Amino acid sequence: MYVKKSGMAGCAAVICTLLVFGLLVQVADAQEKLYKGITIKALLYAQPAAWAVEKLKGDWERQTGAKVIIETSEYGGLWEKQLMDFMARTGTYDIVAFDIPWNPIHGESGNLLPLGPLMERIGDPGYDIADVVPRVLKLHCTWKGKIIGLPFAPSVNFLFYRKDLLEDPIEKAAFQAKYGYDLRVPETMQQLWDVSEHFTREGLFGWADAPKRGEHATWAWFPFFCAWTDESFLDADNKVIIDSREAVDSLEFFVNLHKFAPSASVSWGHDEVTTLIQTKKVAVALHQAELSSAMENPEESEVVGLIGYAPVPKKKVESAGLGGMAIGLSAYSHNSEAAFKFMEWITNPSTARRVAELGGPPFRRSVINDPELSAKYPYFKAFGAALDAAFARPRIPQYVELSEVVSAAVQAALIKEKTPKSALEDGASKIREMMEKWGYPQ
Amino acid sequence: MTIPDLVHYYDQKLGKMTLLKQDQRSRVIAFQKIPFFRRPSLPLKYILILPTVITLLAVTIFPLLFSLNLSFHEWDLKTPVGARFIGLANFIAIVNDPVFWVSMKVTFVFTFCVVSLQFLLGLGLALLFTKEIIGKNVWRSIIFLPMMATPVAVGATWKYMFHSFFGIINYFLSLVNVSGLDWLGNPSLALFSIMIVDTWQWTPFMFLILHAGLESIPREPFEAAKVEGASRWQVLRYITLPLLRHAALIALVVRTMDAFKVYDLVFLLTRGGPSYITETLSIYTFRYGFRFARIGYAAALSYVMLFIIIAISRIYIRVLKRAS
């Protein structure tokens, strides 16, 4: 009797323990999978950082129970898709990637939710925002004091050069004989000219960049403009300075440098330049820093280990254009909280490191200075320095229209439709008219 | 009306007794003798066409009227300021914009060249197909294939074909010692390259219409001409072309309207560059609508395009009527 009673008590105890344990597991599971059943859609720029997130998102999905759909787009489509979504206010995309010049547009129009309140309410205490490169945070992610995005894939113009060519003893001797100084990674515009000229020969181009119609042309010329003028297109008082003497000189140099580039490059974007570098057809190119991972991919590149990275050479100052993508939370999202947590997750210190490991550009000091990653991606050190010093394009909501005029002027000069001086004078005149209309007295 | 003229009648539709005049009652009784499935049910007709009418209003009429209204407003979606009525200011700005006139010129040159070329090629093919050719049906199917492809796929494929280093066209040219041409970046070749692609894709359309037109021409005039000893050129000039006029004009009207609105090929191949060399009106409108988000101005541009296309169509129709 006693044994029977104690046996039953034992069974009851086991069952209760199991029930309690099961309940605890359920509760824990429910607490973790906070966003079960929620689908978040992110519109990102088609580049290594987005592809890295596509690979890593599963970890967050398993943790939270949410589903994440990553849609990538080329540059033009990225703007148009988010514009149409914001116009219609459908909230199709919860998260959008935006280029730095679009920051004022979204900031003024209220298309992106300010993240401050969310960060205060449900922010991750371990996010460590102080680790983000300050210039990136300020120029990419902030508008009029409010944080409207998180850093994701910043970019600067960079020189990609063939280490094997610049270190070749025969090339060094020939260069020394012709130009009177040692062949080196160009540090000044004159050196850039000499190196490009020296390597322009049958089967090889001395220079390449991507000045195709649209923002690409503006972006390709921008570092040269900044190197000559030490300014952006608008000065501190928002006055147009693209027709100054220094600006004209910079465009003349830029146009003349293209005689060492493929003639077809006037209609090229970044993809074409990437292919040209990968197929060993160019000695020096102006390219996007984060695309260096494409150079080191043995499946598609013939120049693995042969490409060096350097800042844009100096004229008056060292320069680079600050660009790239931040990610913002759509004001029309139906899942703001979940979307914000995903944004926070992909940009937190540990995931940012994993994204950088998979080829995304770094934006945290801890990642830039990581010795293991720096060994894998030699451009990190120069990239970090460039981020600190890079020039931002004009931060006005009407930048896309201003850029269109600049792009047309650059293209007109490149195809010899106009001289650089007349192209910039015509462009400046038109932009001044537009700036007056927009409320920026000239 | 006297009381004996009125009769009570139970109206089944109304479900109650109704006072009717004698002649009305006769008509009602006559109507009710018709089997129900043969009765003309007036409300049902309207109900059945209602979905079409609603769709037409929603998809065509409403957008037309909305965009017309929009064209009289300034509305920049990049700023929080909403739409502002500005009257004809958008249209005046269009007329004063030199880039608009450049794009008009590019569009007219493109349209004239491609339509003329496609017409000549299509006519040549259609005349060829009046002969007995081995595998005629197979050849006809092959000729129609480009027309079936989506313009986006066509543009993307030709962009690779035109690549100055890796494109297949330059590869074949290199076999005959012609050095790589810059098809899309050279200002002298960019618009021509787009014309090549458009001609490749839409010549089959001209061929289709003209071939059908040729097939429908009666044989008697040709037999009479043969008997009279007319030459091939005389037959073509005095019999074939005049009888083909209606079909030719239809083909020309349709292709002209399409070519005038060309967008996808230009967007994929050159985006309007280099500079403004290939900036068609559609690309120009797209830029204002979707890049600059100035939808009032873009709506005004759309209406300018519409008026131009209507004017061109009216010219064609007038010529067609005169031919009739």
Image (tube, rainbow, N blue to C red):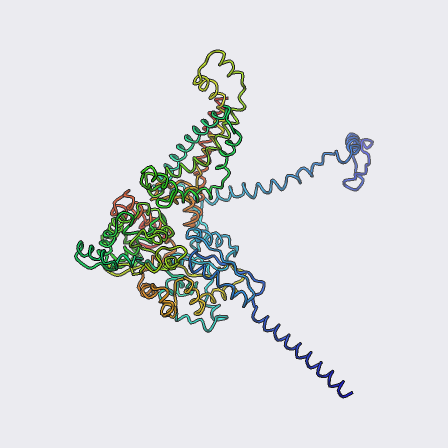
Image coords of residue A325 (percent x, y): 41, 59
Task: Note whether A97 is above or below B54 in the view shown.
Answer: below
Closest to the observer: A287 or B73?
Answer: A287
Image coords of residue A333 (percent x, y): 52, 60
Task: Note whether A409 is above or below A301 in the view shown.
Answer: above
Image coords of residue B164 (percent x, y): 35, 44
Tally of marks:
0
Closest to the observer: A358 or B74?
Answer: A358
Relative horizontal placement of residue B83, taking residue B30 as reference (left or right): left
Q: In which quadrant is the N terminus of chain B drawn?
A: top right
Closest to the observer: B146 or B89?
Answer: B146
Image coords of residue A382 (percent x, y): 31, 64
Relative horizontal placement of residue A111, taking residue A388 as reference (left or right): right
Residue B77 seen in the figure? no
Residue A28 seen in the figure? yes
Task: Note whether B67 is above or below A365 in the view shown.
Answer: above
Q: Work out which residue is located at the far top of the displayed protein and give it.
A: B228
Relative horizontal placement of residue B2, taking residue B161 as reference (left or right): right
Relative horizontal placement of residue A239, taking residue A111 as reference (left or right): left
Q: Work out which residue is located at the far bottom of the displayed protein and give it.
A: A2
- Within the image, what quadrant is residue B180 found in? top left
